Image: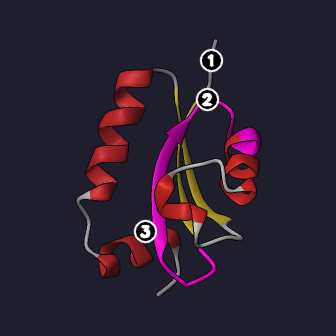
Amino acid sequence: MTDHVVYVLECADGSLYTGYTTDLDRRVAEHNAGSGAKYTRARTPVEVVYREHYDSRSTAMSREYEIKQHSRAEKERLVGLE
């Protein structure tokens, strides 16, 4: 069974980035190496501040989309940064 993870990163500039992966350690390493998402390339280093695990890809991707629609304040409450 594959673990599907929705995660929130705090970037070096204090911004928050939300993503999806099946291998969180590898994905964070990619972000920090500058080969991850275009958004994070100029904002390294990044740190995982929140994660949720799901059994299905579709559920995880739906949740990723939902989090991405949140305001900054809602994301901060979700990850406990407020």
Q: Which residues are magenta?
A: 11-26
For image coordinates 76% across by 43% down, the residue present is 25
The disc, 1 or 2, on the residue closer to the chain's N-terminal end is 1
Q: Which numbered disc, 1 or 2, marks the residue closer to the eye?
A: 2
- Taking the image as shown, residue 42 lies to the left or right of residue 47, namely left
* Residue on which the image places disc 1: 2
Q: Is residue 25 above or below residue 59?
A: below
For image coordinates 62% across by 17% down, the residue present is 2
Which residue type carries mark 3?
Answer: Leu
For image coordinates 25% across by 73% down, the residue present is 71
Contact between labelled residues 2 and 1, with CB atoms less than 8 Å apart: yes
Q: Is residue 13 inside the magenta stretch?
A: yes
Mark 1 and mark 2: span between their CA atoms?
A: 7 Å
Q: Is residue 38 inside the magenta stretch?
A: no
Which residue type carries mark 1?
Answer: Thr
The disc, 1 or 3, on the residue closer to the chain's N-terminal end is 1
Mark 2 and mark 3: span between their CA atoms?
A: 21 Å
Q: Residue furthest bottom?
A: 82
Which residue type carries mark 2?
Answer: Thr
SS for tag 2?
loop
